Image (cartoon, grey):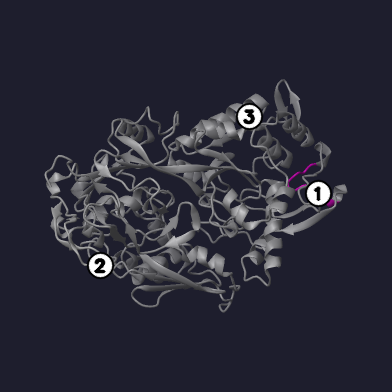
Amino acid sequence: MTPTATEAGDGTPTDEPERTQPPDDARMTDTVRVFQTNTADEFNFNPFTPSDNTAGDLFITQLDGFTKVTDASQWRGTSMFETPHHIARDEAEVITWVEDWEVEEPYDMYNYHDDRCTFWNGKPYDAEARYLYDKVRYFSEGNKFAEGAVHRQEALSQWDYHWYNSRGDVPGAEANPQNAIVLGNQAKRTDGNFPLPPVWSNPWIDRFEAASSEESYQTQISNLRGTRVSFEKLAEEGWGSGPYEIQSPDDVGSESVRLTLRSEDLGAEAPHPHAEHANIDYMEMQLGSIERERTLAGEGQIDVHEGAVTPNGPDWNPERLPDHMKETTRYFQVSGGDALWWNMNNSHLENLWLRRAMATAIDFEQAGNNGWGPQRSIPLSQDTGCLDAVANATFSEDFVDSLHTWPKTADIETATTYMQNGGYERQGGTWVGPNGNEPQIDIQIRGDIGDWVGAAQTIRDQMQSFGIPMTFSAPDNSTWTNNMNSYQNASPNFDISIHWYGEANAFGHYQSRSAWWDTGAIVSGDGEAAPNTPDRRSADPGDEYTELNQPLQVEIPSEVGSIEAPTGADAAPFNPPDLSGNGIDSVELDLPSIFDTLRKPAESQEAAQERLNLCARYYNYYLPKFAFHQYAFGEWGNVRDFDWPPADHDSLRWQRSFNISDTITQGGILQASYDEELDR
């Protein structure tokens, strides 16, 4: 550091040192190593393909925006972050593609893009590129000949984007007004499919517009889905958008991809603003299986990775990682939880009493400990269909206390009663259903998520001990995704799965959404869609069942918190049970109508709260999914060769997707350390 004369507050000269940046050759390293479970041969940046092989996209695309890990309702765009760990600056500006947003009830949403964002090739990463890309999406969803379909996105200017819900002004399209909270959930973009440039989108739009028949139109949809955009193609064309670029196809190897900071000094065609404060020249994105990931981590070859490091943790623990790899921050992931998904097309899982018995017989505390570890897994304290933080912000304490509490540790005696209520008899240690058949249930999860593996194997063992035969399967990400996706099958191809479960507010939980990316809605879509559409639409008022055979036209007991239902084999069917026909005082619910009304501008706060309460009561009674815990999360990495902010620093509390690995590397928050013995 160079001493310079500065002035104190009273104007007196002082000799306080001025911090100056050391030379590049004093850095401990010029490369940060990350890992993604994918392969270079399978990676595909085209989001319109049936299989999701996009893993790695977060490290090659411009940051969209941030939500706070401890409060998902907080959002921020382009921002200044304090950088106490940087040598030559006190703060750094991190730019995001969406720098601000707004909504106008009841239809309109706006994004305002940062005009410094470009593709790697220097072309503007702007609202026009987004508009054309969204038009490809519109056509890919089968809308060309669909009655009432219209493309409701537009670029108001080069950097301002507008889209809106149906106003009912097109024949065949009903108006879809929504309240400001629901509109805001959509406008606060932080993650999503990242646009390719107009030179990619325009030819597809031309092909779709030229299609004169349904047959030729569907041919173009199939062609689009069969198109691959590889790492090499992105490098050749300069189609990425993040601060680090793949400069040449030669930088793509079989096991890793080398990315270079978009700095003028490093030959960037279009330098990125983050090059002004980032001091890490290269990023090595390593690729492979979960086994390779663990091997590299154990060898100290991953520098930045999401996750908490806990004793005996199934993925990351002090015994697995070298001494210079440490947990650098830990936080309560307010929107991070997990739930059991039931596919009620299975004749046993559609039995209400069997679902209740399983939820009661499983020791979720043990499953959480075996999956996430005792320091990370935090059982939910209530059963409203929301995670705890959202429930606490939505409902009164008296209302939550009045609901039924499902145990998070096993209660075998009560579970046994529930099985008998559902018409099951135990024969030779195995439960046999009203139809005389034993349950045949497979719990299927992504094999590359160690937390899920440990929890799912525990659940399988507990169910087998209880007398419900259960198998375990752990396919790769692509296969699991396809099995969860309804459009791949007449019905989703699974019995039970563990799935992420988290939303910023109750409006995210109390709705029906489509396909496997429905992470927190208590009802999945109903399967109604145009031919070859890549997603299933939300359930509509009047629909009776969803694609998972979840009942939508149901009764619940009039008494809040009651789980009374018909019992015994003679009371079947149980999906849904006939309460009023069996003398149980009840209330009728049309779930899609409640969801639809709830999301519209409310006539009063009291009316909106009553609908929220009904949604919670439906979940509490029917268990359409079973959310069982939230968890602590964090980040670990190389503390020898890199400088990190303090563990509780604000710059480690903002994420684009579901962890901070890409935000701290892409944002230039993480810094390469300098040789401590250098004479500065």
Type of amino acid under label 2 = Lys
Q: Which residue is mark 2?
A: 123
Location of residue 547 in the rendering, given as x and y in whole percent from the top left corner: 61, 51
Bounds of the magenta segment = 572-580
Q: Nearer the viewer, residue 139 or 111?
A: 111
Residues marked 3 and 2 touching at CB (< 8 Å): no
How many neighbours does mark 2 have within 10 angstroms: few (below 14), some (14-19), or many (20 or more)?
some
- Closer to the chain start, of discs 1 and 2, is 2
Determine whether the residue tagged by mark 1 lies in a helix, strand or loop: loop
Q: Amino acid at mark 3?
A: Met
Give the left or right position of residue 351, taking residue 502 as reference: right
Q: Position of residue 313 (x, y in %)?
A: 45, 31
* In the image, residue 407 above or below residue 584: above
Q: CA distance from mark 1 to mark 3?
A: 28 Å
Q: Secondary structure at mark 2?
A: loop
> What kind of residue is marked 1?
Asp
Residue at the image position 83 percent from the left and 39 percent from the top: 570
Q: Name the main secondary structure of what is drawn in magenta.
A: loop
Query: CA–CA distance between discs 3 and 2?
Result: 56 Å
- Residue 608, horizontal then vertical, whole percent: 67, 65
Q: Which residue bears the numbered disc 1?
A: 578
The answer to whether residue 182 is above or below residue 572 is below
Identified at 25% across, 49% down, the residue is 671
Crowding near the residue tagged with mark 1, few <14, some 14–19, many ≥20 C-alpha atoms within 10 Å: some
Farthest residue toward the right?
A: 583
SS category of the residue bearing label 3:
helix
Looking at the image, is mark 1 or mark 3 earlier in the sequence?
Answer: 3
Going from the N terminus, do you reach mark 3 or mark 2 first?
2
Residue 436 seen by the camera: no
Name the residue tied to disc 3: 463
Q: How dense is the environment of label 3, judged by Cα within 10 Å: few (below 14), some, or many (20 and up)? A: some
605 left or right of 212?
right
